[in-house]
Image: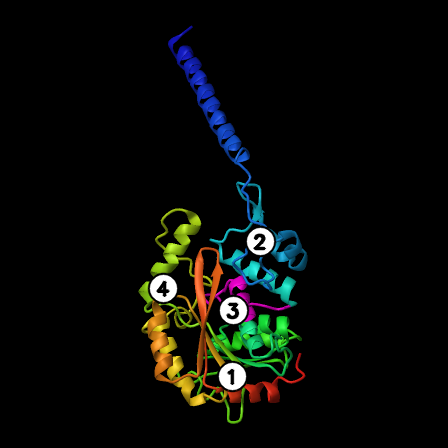
């Protein structure tokens, strides 16, 4: 055998060894994932409100039956469970669409790119706890129907609070926003869903410093106001929080945020963050003391509560409540206040909530 013949033979043997090693590696990886212990999930997310429709894990077969477009984003994870990639903004948006179709009978739902795509279970919790708040003043019965009027401050392009509140309790909503694009998007959702049309009105707030003025008309009364205020105090803080969230999802450090459906600046941050925003909301609500039974807002940071409570005392509210909510590892709360005296509350219930159950 010549020199070159021996080299070719040795080279062939080397390739066989290399292919064998690659095969072993692939088999090992396959066995690693196949032999992963089945992840055990709790049957219910008990931290969510008892009436929340999202206490159980997502049933993707049911969701796909309601929204077939979701199927392209669903696959088996390493534990053999159906899931979507929550790092993929398009997948998250389609999941929201499917949830709203399946649970809330919404036929059309869309949001512009770079606008907030909210987690539905948490938004539903707010509405259910707000319903309980109304029930406390109504002998434990939740007042329902279109005569119960809610004001959504910062309705956003997604229009989620009116969707849930109208479907669950039949309430009518007025949603306000300072962003013309968000208002246009929310209006499209209302107009293209027969269940919302006539029950939800969207208004543009032209004055960036006003929260209630111009939105609550003369002789207009609301039983409840809801708000999910801008959380962060700066764009840099919002970006840093987004990167932390994405890093946790991917279990590795992410340096560039996914921009699609992450939220507009006015949805995510304002000067002073939620603390300053809610303080200003409290101050402005005093001028509309008799226009709403309950004013409420979401407060994500526990550290914000002290100054918010101080603002409420300064405005001499007659009653305030803090309602704790929990979703997974995240704890937030609703802060609610009213300026109505006990006698005014009783008259409100008698005049406005009679025969609405």
Question: Which residue lies under the disc numbered 2?
Answer: 44
| Label 2 close to label 1 by CB (< 8 Å) | no
Position of residue 218 measured from the top left corner of the image (x, y, whole percent): 51, 94
First of labels 2, 1 by sequence position: 2
Q: CA distance from mark 1 to mark 4?
A: 33 Å
222 in relation to 266, above or below? below
| Residues packed near mark 2 inside 10 Å, few (<14), some (14 to 19) or many (20 plus) | few
The residue at the point 32 percent across, 68 percent down is 234
Question: Which residue lies under the disc numbered 3?
Answer: 126
Q: Circle 1 — which element?
A: strand
Tag nearer the camera, 3 or 4: 3
Position of residue 357 measured from the top left corner of the image (x, y, whole percent): 67, 78
The residue at the point 48 percent across, 61 percent down is 326
**Residue 190 on the magenta span:** no
Q: Circle 4 — which element?
A: helix
Q: CA distance from mark 3 to mark 2?
A: 18 Å
Question: Which residue lies under the disc numbered 1?
Answer: 293
Residue extent of the magenta highlight: 106-129
């Amino acid at each position: 055998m010549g020199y070159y013949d021996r080299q070719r033979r040795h080279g062939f043997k080397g390739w066989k060894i290399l292919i064998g090693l690659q095969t072993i590696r692939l088999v090992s990886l396959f066995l690693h994932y196949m032999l992963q212990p089945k992840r055990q999930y709790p049957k219910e997310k008990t931290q969510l409100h008892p009436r929340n429709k999202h206490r159980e894990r997502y049933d993707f077969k049911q969701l796909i039956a309601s929204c077939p477009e979701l199927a392209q984003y669903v696959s088996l994870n390493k534990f053999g469970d159906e899931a979507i990639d929550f790092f993929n903004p398009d997948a998250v948006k389609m999941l929201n669409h499917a949830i709203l179709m399946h649970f809330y009978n919404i036929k059309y739902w869309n949001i512009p790119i770079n606008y907030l795509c909210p987690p539905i279970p948490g938004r539903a919790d707010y509405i259910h706890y707000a319903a309980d708040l109304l029930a406390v003043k109504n002998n434990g019965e939740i007042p329902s129907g279109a005569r119960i009027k809610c004001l959504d401050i910062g309705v956003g392009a997604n229009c989620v609070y009116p969707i849930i509140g109208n479907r669950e309790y039949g309430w009518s909503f007025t949603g306000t926003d300072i962003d013309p694009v968000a208002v246009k998007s929310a209006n499209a959702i209302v107009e293209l869903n027969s269940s919302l049309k006539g029950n939800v009105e969207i208004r543009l707030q032209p004055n960036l410093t006003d929260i209630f003025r111009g939105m609550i008309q003369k002789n207009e009364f609301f039983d409840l106001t809801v708000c999910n205020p801008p959380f962060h105090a700066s764009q840099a803080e919002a970006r840093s929080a987004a990167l932390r969230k994405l890093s946790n999802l991917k279990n590795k450090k992410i340096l560039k945020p996914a921009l699609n459906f992450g939220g507009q600046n006015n949805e995510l941050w304002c000067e002073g963050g939620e603390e300053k925003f809610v303080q200003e909301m409290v101050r402005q609500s005093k001028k509309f003391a008799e226009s709403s039974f309950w004013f409420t807002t979401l407060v994500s940071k526990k550290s914000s509560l002290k100054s918010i409570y101080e603002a409420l005392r300064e405005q001499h509210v007659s009653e305030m409540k803090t309602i704790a909510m929990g979703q997974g590892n995240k704890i937030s709360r609703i802060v609610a206040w009213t300026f109505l005296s006990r006698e005014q509350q009783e008259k409100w219930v008698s005049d406005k909530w009679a025969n609405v159950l």
